[in-house]
Image: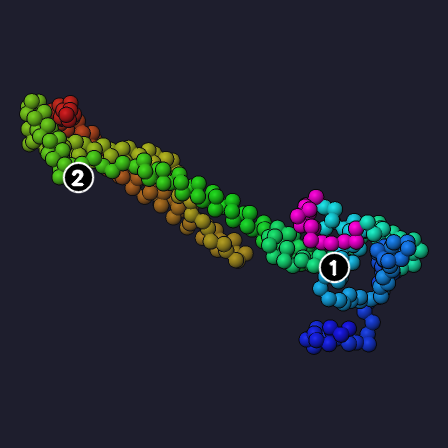
Amino acid sequence: MHQIIFEPESRVSLSLEKPEAKSSYLVIDHVEFKQKSDSPAGSETTSVYFNSNLNTIIGGRSNGKSTLTNSIAKSLGNAVFTSNENTSTSTHNMYTFNDANFKVYWEGDSEPNNDRQVEFIPQDYMITLADDDLARNKLIRSTVETDECNYEKIINYEKNIQENNSEIGQLLEELETLNQQLNNLKSPEGDKAGIKKQLESINESIREQSDKADFSAESQKKYQIADCNLKKLTGKKRLTEFNLQDLASVKAKKIKLQSPLSETDDSDYNKQLTDFLSALEQEANQKWQKKLISIETEQNNHLEYFKEAINKIHTSSDYMNGPRIKSVQVK
């Protein structure tokens, strides 16, 4: 109690309210252990009783404060002393009452019971936690897991990290593939001057082949003009043939005039309208057929003209000499 006087006020609190009551099953009543003494028996049993609420062990350095709490944890089989993860190196400074027949009595029990578990935080726990990333993260995770909302955020965060890592890996593979394809691309052989020289050589070869075939530049031009006209006439001929096929289909159909819907019951009046519409429909069909025949005649004349023009090109010397240019091979 004397040491408490020297503690900062922020660490001391006096209150009339009793801390939360715990079940007696969770409260340690007292502990017993043997200590050496000068008595004839050589040792005597020491009992340390605890309050059911907060207990504070006060004493100077190396007076056994941690030794007492370490002994309680060890006798109850705490994981700090029994886990395979904790080696002798991590517990060699955690002193206990060895060979002291240490016993723990729980509230309401007359016999000691070492089967119950307690949460034990060693003296150097914070130092160890600061050096051990895995243990620190494990503690933080176990704390956050008590809040379902926050724990769900952690799960979603880890899921997003996995998805991002997977996407990053895929993008890196695609980048590697693109880099390989880029390295495999070859630039055109030769520079601009070299390409120009190659084109001149090709043109010279064409001229030599034309001379050997006795096919002058003027003859080539005439053939190209004839070939272009032939393609135009052939296209027009096909279009005219299609028009004639369509006319044959149109001529088989008649014009039908739709009678306006009369709103009167006068039969004479309605008959007058119907008769006039029928006569008008007959006149329209006569004029329609006459016009179709005129268009058909005109299309047939065009077709004959295209056929004659095409045949004239096929038999012309300008065109007939044309296949010889196709036999010229570029070296």
- The residue that appears at 35% across and 37% down in the rendered structure is 181
Q: Is residue 312 left or right of residue 182?
A: left
The amino acid type of the residue labelled 1 equals Ser
Q: Nearer the viewer, residue 210 or 40?
A: 40
Q: Residues within 10 Å of mark 2 (few under 14, many from 20)?
A: few
Per the model, the C-alpha gap separating discs 2 and 1 is 86 Å
- Quadrant of the image containing the C terminus: top left
Percent coordinates x, y for residue 301 in the rendering: 21, 34
| Residue in the picture at 17% in, 34% down | 228
Disc 1 target residue? 66
The residue at the point 79 percent across, 53 percent down is: 97
Task: Identify the magenta region.
Answer: 84-98
Element class at badge 1: helix
- The percent position of residue 26, horizontal first and vertical second, equals 84, 58
Residue found at x 48% / y 46%: 168
143 to 291, vertically: above or below = below
Is any atom of residue 218 visible in this view? yes
Q: Which disc, if any, is residue 191?
A: 2
Q: Is residue 13 left or right of residue 312?
A: right
**Quadrant housing residue 325:** top left
